[in-house]
Image (cartoon, rainbow, N blue to C red):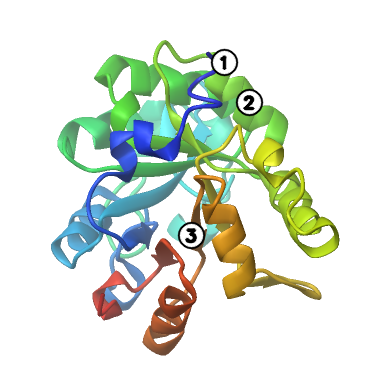
């Protein structure tokens, strides 16, 4: 079976435990003066109640998956360099603004052996290194793979030796919403058969995803709904009241549960 596609959400220990899921967006970093997507930021997030760690993968020149959001180092390190043009050794020599260094995915899985990771694969070149790191650490049960690119996401899932949870790309989200809005949910179970979660903004243009009816209809297809990126405690509670299964936030320390 393709990486877990078609399996139920309940088949994955990734979704075990009491709800809501609390996803630390790139760790807990900004207000602490810690660099995002570092081991230190992830440790702080877990200390402050995160149930899952959200991060991003790019690949170095020599084919290692590293946890970094941007394709370049200007914003996080003040360096005019592209991640994919540097070797791992060169990347890890660079100190980030706020301290810390860019970790490899394999290293993060090793140093945080009980943490569950939500991984957004940012480039085609990162597909194989990301899957290789998961395979090396035998971390299939504690990883969810996603991507804004559906081909990238599907390609990653084809490379796994064991099932891995996945969330729908925006193409999947829009198709599900159209089913909900225009067809009373007819066909939504087919659209969502291949994913275990939708991780979505509250809205996109004129489309409003944060409605109780949409959330409930998605959940009826055995698919969780997680909203990003929510940093206001009142909005967090409002979304949970609507029925959201999880919240992705830069400020998991403000999450009241």
x and y percent of residue 48 in the render? 18, 68
- Location of residue 218 with respect to 229 vertically, above or below: above
Left or right: where does residue 246 sit relative to residue 182? left
User: In front: 9, or 137?
Assistant: 9
Q: Secondary structure at mark 3?
A: strand
Picture quadrant of residue 162: top left
Crowdedness of circle 3 by 10 Å Cα count: few (<14), some, many (20+)?
many
Counting residues from the N terminus, which is met first, the one under dot 3 or under dot 1?
Answer: 1
x and y percent of residue 187 in the render? 75, 43
Q: Is residue 35 visible?
A: no
Left or right: where does residue 108 sit relative to residue 197? left
Indicate which label's residue lies in the foreground, 2 or 3. 3
Q: Which residue is mark 1?
A: 158
Q: Secondary structure at mark 2?
A: helix
Q: Which mark is residue 226?
A: 3
Q: Which mark is residue 154?
A: 2
x and y percent of residue 138 in the render? 27, 19
x 26%, y 44%: residue: 16
Crowdedness of circle 1 by 10 Å Cα count: few (<14), some, many (20+)?
some
Left or right: where does residue 227 sit relative to residue 163? right
Q: Quadrant of the C terminus?
A: bottom left
How far apart are the two marked residues, 1 and 2, measured between alpha carbons? Answer: 6 Å
């Amino acid at each position: 079976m393709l990486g877990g596609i078609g399996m139920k959400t309940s088949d994955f220990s990734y979704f075990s435990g009491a709800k809501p899921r609390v996803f630390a967006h790139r760790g807990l970093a900004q207000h602490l003066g810690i660099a995002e997507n570092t081991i230190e930021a992830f440790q702080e997030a877990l200390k402050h109640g995160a149930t899952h760690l959200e991060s991003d993968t790019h690949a170095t020149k020599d084919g290692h998956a590293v946890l970094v959001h941007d394709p370049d180092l200007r914003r996080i390190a003040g360096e005019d360099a592209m991640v994919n043009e540097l070797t791992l050794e060169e990347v890890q020599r660079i100190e980030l603004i706020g301290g810390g260094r860019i970790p490899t995915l394999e290293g993060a899985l090793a140093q945080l052996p009980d943490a569950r990771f939500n991984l957004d694969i940012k480039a085609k070149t990162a597909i194989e290194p990301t899957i290789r790191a998961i395979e090396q650490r035998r971390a299939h049960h504690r990883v969810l793979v996603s991507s804004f690119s559906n081909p990238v996401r599907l390609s990653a899932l084809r490379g796994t030796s064991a099932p891995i949870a996945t969330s729908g790309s925006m193409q999947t989200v829009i198709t599900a919403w159209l089913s909900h809005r225009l067809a009373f949910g007819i066909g939504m179970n087919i659209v969502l058969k291949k994913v275990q979660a939708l991780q979505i903004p509250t809205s996109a243009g004129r489309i409003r995803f944060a409605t109780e009816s949409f959330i409930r209809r998605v959940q009826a297809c055995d698919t969780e709904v997680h909203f990003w990126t929510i940093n206001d405690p009142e909005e967090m509670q409002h979304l949970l009241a609507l029925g959201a299964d999880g919240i992705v936030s830069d400020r998991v320390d403000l999450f009241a549960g």
